[in-house]
Amino acid sequence: MSSSKQKEREDDIIDASASSDHEDEHSSGSDNDAPEDVASPSTSTQKKKKKKKSKVAKALNALRGKTDIPQELVDRVLDQVKAEGAAGSAEANQVNVREALEQLKIMDVVKGKAGVGGINKKDMGEHKFWATQPVPQLGEGPPLDDGYIEPSVPREEVRQEPYPLPKDFEWSTLDIDDPKQNKEVYDLLSLNYVEDDEASFRFQYSSEFLQWALKPPGYHKEWHIGVRVSSNKKLVAFISGVPMILRVRGHQFPVAEINYMCVHKKLRSKRLAPVLIKEVTRQVHLKGIFQAIYTGGIVIPTPVSVCRYHHRLVNIPKLIDIKFCYVPRNMTLARMIRVNKVPSTFSTRGLRQMEEKDVEQVADLFTRYMKRFEMVPLYDVDEVRHQFMSGIGTGAVGDGGPGRRVGQVTWTYVVEDPDTHKITDFFSFYSLPSTVINNTKNPILEAAYLFYYASETAFNADAEESGELKKRLEAVIGDAIVVASEAKFDVFNALTLMDNVPILQDLKFGLGDGMLNFYLYNWRTAPLAGMKSEGGVEPGKGVGVVML
């Protein structure tokens, strides 16, 4: 893009008489995911940028069925599957890997933030910003001991003034309780946050979702940071943090969970993202916290774990209409629908929606169950109540549509033993829809994401070795898919973390090509088992944190 055209785009935003955000729906920024701004230096020539775009288009067109799936991609995926030794890897071959790639359009946006075949993976030499930060650098190797990289400092030694912004911009603290400001964040994310590279899908965060995600117990309003245009006060960038107590192996410490970094598409050249990160870091330090956790699809220094996405198709006709997936060559549409049909009844006796009276039992079960994983959040009773109950919406089930309350974000069910009235299991999932851009027939993709779960079965002798836990989780999580189907979700998504890996294939989840990288700020630890085993720990069991 020429400098004059870029300047025109920036002036459109800075000018108080600029056109409305509605027009942005058809605009195309050079970056689709805000974190790219940190990792990607500005390109000096138009020729260089065009070359990059052509590679992106070629790779994505292949996965969209416009050309054959490249043999190189099939070989790479097959090699990874075999190397990981995950569920179903023994049966994997070039034919079924190719069919899986053709069947699923592995979108960045379906929580994805991740590229296809490595197209979003940046040259590590370009990460000049991260070279200045207290994060493990490439080539360091695993640490001898877990611990901080830079020591904590007293509050008075933390920078007291905000970092300077480019001319024409100013800092703003967002009040998520204020409907007007909540909508500003919603509008910014809805039009400029994560989308796929061909601008077909984009996350659609609701006001209720933002309230749930950004206001856990003890949250700090100062960690909801925006950037506005000074002249017209238009919100053009955002980043957030929420507090969490994290356990990493044998250490537990307070962290900030950093999320929703977003820069307006037309301002990506302003390099606002590094300043956003530095400013939220400053605000976190002012609260006496010096560690953070965050995720991303791009690779920056240095992931502590990598998980892979899997997708359980539910509403096949709609998913095909919006080009989320395709009918494989050796299958008819009717057979594809039949194979993926979701049961209409629960398989778990005593399953019901979670109620206030269950909070303490669920908190106890959750705490004990999560001890089985190496990196997990530590929730007290109030945090359990917030995570699993505060997003259930208002009114009765059905008031917000089939299987839904008005404004419902989370679904949490418990299994109650009818004799002892003890809670033996629970599961939860949350709703994060995406806008299907330029599709008037089906404008919204309804996606459910597996959240946290637990089962007393895990504590039975030899429960894992005998397959007893796997069988129980298949029944419980299978019922979660039934609930999602009744609530008219189109797809159910899960990552290779916690105890997911052994159950995904039998529950008919398709292998995704999207990766989610987990990062720790100012903390060193050896790699954690995500999509593959690490240090003798089975796949998934290193990661017990579900990032929203």
Image (spheres, rainbow, N blue to C red):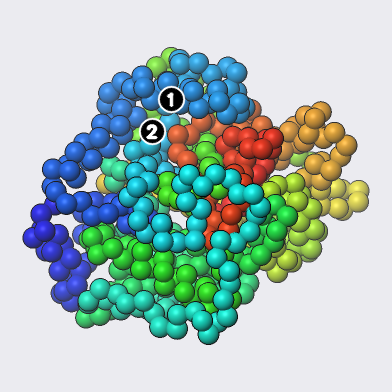
Give whichever of 488, 116 is nearer the camera: 116
> Where is residue 428 shown, x and y percent of the image?
64, 51
Question: In the rendered image, which quarter is residue 523 located in?
Answer: bottom right
Give whichever of 97, 120 is nearer the camera: 120
Instruction: Please name the residue shown 55% across and 25% down the image.
Output: 83
At label 2, counting other C-alpha atoms closer than 10 Å, the crowd grade (few under 14, some 14-19, many 20 or more) is: some
Instruction: Please name the residue shown 47% across and 74% down the image.
Output: 282
> In this rendering, is residue 538 above or below 6?
above
> Where is residue 328 shown, x and y percent of the image?
42, 21
> In this rendering, is residue 454 above or below 247?
above
The residue pinned by badge 2 equals: 117
Looking at the image, the residue that sits furthest to the right is: 419
Spatial CA distance of label 1 from label 2 is: 8 Å
Q: Is residue 296 visible?
A: no
Instruction: Please name the residue shown 46% across and 47% down the image.
Output: 138
Give the residue type at disc 1.
Answer: Arg
Give whichever of 94, 305 is nearer the camera: 305
> Where is residue 50 shown, x and y percent of the image?
17, 42
Tell me whether the residue at label 1 lies in contact with that at label 2, contact meaning CB atoms closer than 8 angstroms.
yes
Give whichever of 519, 485 is nearer the camera: 519
Where disc 2 sits, the SS reads loop
At label 1, counting other C-alpha atoms closer than 10 Å, the crowd grade (few under 14, some 14-19, many 20 or more) is: few
Where disc 1 sits, the SS reads helix
| Residue 471 located left or right of residue 321 | right
Give the residue type at disc 2.
Answer: Gly
**Mark closest to the chain's N terminus, 1 or 2:** 1
Instruction: Please name the residue shown 66% across and 32% down the image.
Output: 502
| Residue 540 located left or right of residue 461 | left
The residue pinned by badge 1 equals: 76
